[in-house]
Amino acid sequence: SSHIQYPELIYYFLKAASGTLYLTATHLIYVEASAEVRKETWILHHHISSVEKLPLTTAGYPLLIHCKNFHVAHFVIGQERDCQDVFTSLLKLSQPVKPEELYAFSYNPKMSKENREMGWKLIDLRLDYQRMGIPNDSWEITDINKDYEVCSTYPPEIVVPRAATKAVVMGSSRFRSRGRIPVLSYLYKENNAALCRCSQPLAGFSARCLEDEQMLQAIREANPGCPFMYVVDTRPKLNAMANRAAGKGYENEDNYENIRFKFIGIENIHVMRSSLQKLLEVCEMKSPSMSDFLTGLENSGWLRHIKAVMDAGVFLAKAVREERASVLVHCSDGWDRTAQVCSLASLLLDPFYRTFKGFMVLIEKEWIAMGHKFSHRCGHLDGDPKEVSPVFTQFVECVWQLMQQFPCSFEFSERFLLEIHDHVYSCQFGNFLGTCHKEREELRIFEKTHSLWPFLLQRKQELRNPLYRGFTAYKELQPNTLPFSFQFWCGMYNRFDKGMHPKQCVLDQLLSCISQKVTLEDSASQLENVSHNGLHMPWGGWNGVSDGSALSFCDGQHPPPNLRENGTGSQGRHILGPVILWIISSLSIFHNYH
Amino acid sequence: MEFAELIKTPRADNVVLHCPFHLAVEGTLCLTGHHLIFSSRRQDNAEELWLLHSNIDSIEKRFVGSLGTIVIKCKDLRIIQLDIPGMEECLNIASSIEVLSTLDSVTLMYPFFYRPMFEVLEDGWSSFLLEQEFEHLSSVTNEWRLSYVNKEFSVCPSYPPVAIVPKSIDDEALRKVALFRHGGRFPVLSYYHKKNGMAMMRSSQPLTGTNGRRCKEDEKLVNSTLRSGRRGFVIDTRPLALAQQARAKGGGFEQEVHYPQWRRIHKYIERFHILQESFIKLVEACNDQSHNMDRWLSKLEASNWLSHIKELLTAACLAAQCIDREGASVLVHGSEGTDSTLQVTSLAQIILDPRCRTIRGFEALVVREWLQAGHPFQQRCAQSAYSNSKQKWEAPVFLLFLECVWQIHRQFPCSFEFNEQFLIMLFEHAYASQFGTFLGNNENERAKLKLPQKTMSLWSWVNRPEELSRFQNPLYEANSLVIWPSVAPQSLQLWEGVFLRWNRPSKFLEEAEEERINIIKYNKELQAKLNSHVMAEGR
C-alpha cells in the first residue's frame, strides 16, 4: 500500500529562503530576498561560538553557525570561494585576541560623556550595604583591598566583621586560595544572620591558621542570636577531598569553634560545560521523538545540576531565615558555584533583588565585583576552551525556574533575563569584560565603555512583568525543589526556534493592556473630565507610567545602520514603537505565523 | 437496596484528616449513601470535605494499635488520609466505602438521587441536538442529509438515533453499509470544512476479512464525499501490521483495488489498555516525592504519556492538514471507532473549527463526537489511575483528548473561550459526577436508563452564567483561523493542572491567574467606558 509520510514537524521547519549575507565589523546580517516583509537576521560576531563548514550539498556549500545565546544558523553559500571567505572572516571576527577588539570599545550609542559616566554610577553597591544596615556595630565596609593586597580578584571595598583586625584579614588571606577571604555577601537584617563567601582554605591534611579561625569566629559572633554557624562547601565531597592532597581542601570542624560543616554537591565547571553541550545536542535533534528528547534531557544531567544549585540556594536561605544561622559558603576559588548560590539565596530572601534595580545590584555585587571570570567563562577572547562554562547561564535559569513558581514576585519578565544573558556574551557593554575589578580598571572600561544597566532600564516597559504584585507582596520565596518543579526552558535553549513557542504570547497581550491602560485612562479622563470614578485599579505596585517616554532610545543590541529600517532584527523585539502597540491587534500574530 | 444497610458506622468523631499541603485537622466523619463528609465543626466551615463515593478509586487501610488509618485515592488523583480511632469503626467505615464506591448498578449512582439546588434555565439534555448541527450545516451545503435509520438503535447500537450522511445514500444502503462495518458503525459526517467544502467522516473498520469482502454501498458512500477527480485520505489509527492482522478476525481496511480514489495512511495511536498502563505509571511517578531528577525524568519518559500526547496531536494535525491544506476529504477509523477515532476527529476540529474553541462549541463537540458518537465512558472511566483491581475496559482516552486540547490551548492562549479549569472540570465529571451526562456507554444505554428524565445534565449546570464565569478565558479573542500546534517535544508539557494538582501548592499560580484576569478586566472596563462615551458624543 502507499504511504504518505507527512513530515510531522512541518510546523516549525524553517524554510530555506535565498537572500543576502552581509558581514559588518560587528555583525553578520542576513536579509531574506523573497520575503514579502523585509526579514533580517542579525548575529553579533561575539555571539558566535563555532563556525563549521559542512559537506557540499546540491544547493551549495553549507555553513553552520552556533551562537552562545543558542541561536543556530544554517547558511548555504553558492560559491566555494565565498563560503571559504565567509568562513575565515567569521572565525577571525568571532575570536578576538586582544581585549581592545571587543565591541564595547567601539560601541558608540551617541551618548554624552556625562550620561555615560552617570550610567556607571547607576549601581552603587554601598547603597545596597546601607540598605542592609551596614556599616553597623558588627560589620564595616573597608577599603583594605584598595591596592589589591588582600586579594587581586576582590574589589577594593569589601565588607568584613568589625572584630576582624587587619592582621586577621591579612592572615586569613594567606590561608585562603587566591587570598579570597571570607567577606559578607548578604546580611539578613531581621535576625542578623549573615551570608558570607570565600574560597577554599589551604588546609591540606592538617594545616591550620589562627587568623582564619579568628575570622570565622568574628563572623559567628557578629550574629549573637545563634551559637553556631554553617560552613558550606558547595563541591561534591570527593572533589573537596581530592583538593586536600594539593594543600587545599576544606575546614576541619575540630579546628573551628562551633561550626557545622556541610557539603553540597554541585559539580565543577567542566561537568557543567559538557552537560550543556549534551543538552544543546538534544535541543538540536531533528524531529526527535518524545522518548529521544526526555532520555536526552535526562542524560544531559542539566536539570539535575539546576536542581542542585537551587537546592543549595534554598538551604542557605533556610539556614539564615529559619535557623538564624550565619553561613560561610565556598567552593574551590569561590567565584563560580559560590556566586551562584549566594546570589540565589539573596534573591530568595530579599524582594529587592527581584526588582529591576535590585537584580542589577545583585549581579554587580555577587558576580562582577566578586570576580566571576566572565571573560573566561564566556570565552570573550580566544583562549582556553576548558575555562568556558555556563555558570552564569545556570544562575539565570534558576531565576527563571523561580519565575515559573512565583509568577507575580518578579518585577521583570523572562525577556529581561534573556537580554542580560545576551549581553554577558555580547561584549557590547563594559560590565562583563575582564575577570575581576582590577582587570576592568586596567582595561579602563569605566572610561572607554558604556554600562549595560541604563540601557536596560530604559526598556523597562517591554521587559517588565505585568503580573508583578509589587515589592511588598512576597517576602521570602520558598520554592518547591521536587524534580517535577523544574521545567525545560524552551525560551532559552530553543529560543530561536520560533515554531516551538506558543503562537500567541500572553506576555505581549498583558503588556499591551498595560500600555493601553495609560492612553485609555487619559482619553477617559479627557472625555469625562472626571477621573475614573467607579473603576478601581486592581493591581498595585506599578509606577511605570513615566518610563514610556524614553522608549525610542537605543535598543541596546544593535548599532543603527541603514539596513534595518523595516527589519525586525534577529530578536524581533528591539524597536518598541509608540506606546500604543495595542492597535496591532492579536490578528497580526497570526499574520506572521501563516 | 437501602444504603443504610451498607453503613454500619455512619459517623465517627475525633477523626484526623490529612490532605497534601494542608495542616492535619480533627473533626467528624460522616458517611451517607453517596458521600463521605468530613467536618471540623469550625465556625468558618473551612475544613469541610464532601467526597463522592464514586470519586474514590481505591482505598487502603492499616492499623497501629487501635488507631486505624484509611488512605483514599480519588479518581481526580487526589490522595487523602483519615486517621480513625477505634478498630471496629475504622473497619466498618473502610468496608462501607469499598462497597459504596464500587456499586455495580448505574441506577444506584448519585445522579439518580441528586436534586439540584439551582434553577434550571436551560435543560442541558436538549442543548445540543444533532438536528441543530444539521441546520447549521444546511446553511452552507445541501450535500448531506439527516438519517433516522438508527432510530431504534437497531442498525448500530452504539450510534445515536440520528446521523448525518451523504444525501445520495438512502437508508437501505446505510443498512448494508452497517453490516460491512464493525459494530454497524457506518461512515457518518464528523466535520464539514466550510472553507473548502471538504468533509471528515468517521466509522469503524470495514469487515473485509481474509477473502477481501467488499461492499459497493460502502464504496459509494465514501466516494460521494469526493469532488470529481480528487482523492481522499483514509486515516487508519492502527499500524499496517495490526490492520492486516485484523482481517483474520473478520476486520480489515479499505483496499486500494476497491477504493482507488482513497489513499490510506496508517497513523498509530495506542490502544486503550496501553494508555491505562501509561496513565498509572505517570501518576505513580508524579506522586513519588522521593525521586531524584534522573529518576523522575526516566519515569516520566518510561510512562510514555507524553509520547501518546505527541502521537495523538500529530495524527490530528495530519487529518486537519489533509482537509485544510490538501483540500481532501478524510475518513478516520481504527478498529471499533469508539476511541482513537474520536480522539483524532475531535482534535482535528479543535484545530480547524473556531466554533469548537468557544465554550458552547466545545460542549457541542464533546456531546457530538464523544457522547453521541458512543465513546464508552462508563467502561473507560470506571476506574482511574489508582485502580489496583485487574483492568477491564478502563482507559484515559477522554483525558488524553482533554490534555491535547490543553496543549493546544497553551500554544494559542488567546484562541479559546474557556480556560484550563473548564477542561479539568470535564475530566472530573467524566469520572465522578452528580450529573448524568457521562453515565452509560452510548445513547442507547442512556435512553434505556432514562437519563434525561431522571438525572440532571452537566450542561444545565455549567451553562448558568454564575458557573460560566469561572470557566471563561479572559484572553479570548475570537479568531477564525486554523491553529496549527507544534508537536515538538520542547513544545509539549506535562499537564500540571491535572497531574501535579495535589502535589504542589497552587497559591502562587492562582494569584497569577487572578492578576491576569484583573488586568484584562480593567482594560475592558476602561474600553467599554470609553466606547460608551464616544457613542454618547456621536449622538
Image (tube, coloured by chain):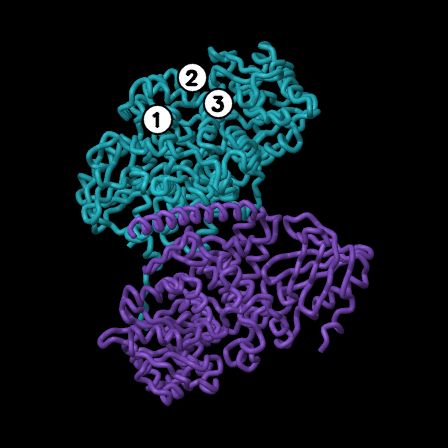
Chain colours: A cyan, B purple
Nearer the observer, A81 or A265: A265
**What x and y, as percent, mark residue B286?**
57, 53
Pointer 1 or 2: first along the chain: 1
**What x and y, as percent, mark residue B300?**
52, 54
Residue picked out by circle 2? A438
How far apart are the two marked residues, 1 and 2, measured between alpha carbons? 17 Å
Q: Of the residues shown, which amino acid type is indicated by label 2?
A: Lys
Which chain contains the residue that carries disc 3? A
Pointer 1 or 3: first along the chain: 3
Hey, which quadrant is residue A423 in on the image? top left
Residue picked out by circle 1? A429
**What x and y, as percent, mark residue B174?**
38, 86
Say whether residue A492 is visible. yes
Q: Residue at x 60, y 25 (%)?
A: A189
Q: Give the side of residue A578 with respect to residue A140, left or right.
A: left
Q: Residue at x 37, y 38 (%)?
A: A462
Binning the other alpha carbons within 10 Å of mark 3 as few (below 14), some (14 to 19) or many (20 upward) gives: many
Say whether residue A557 is visible. no
Q: Secondary structure at mark 3?
A: loop
Q: Mark 2 vs mark 3: same chain?
A: yes
Q: Of the residues shown, which amino acid type is indicated by label 1?
A: Phe
Q: Residue furthest bottom?
A: B172
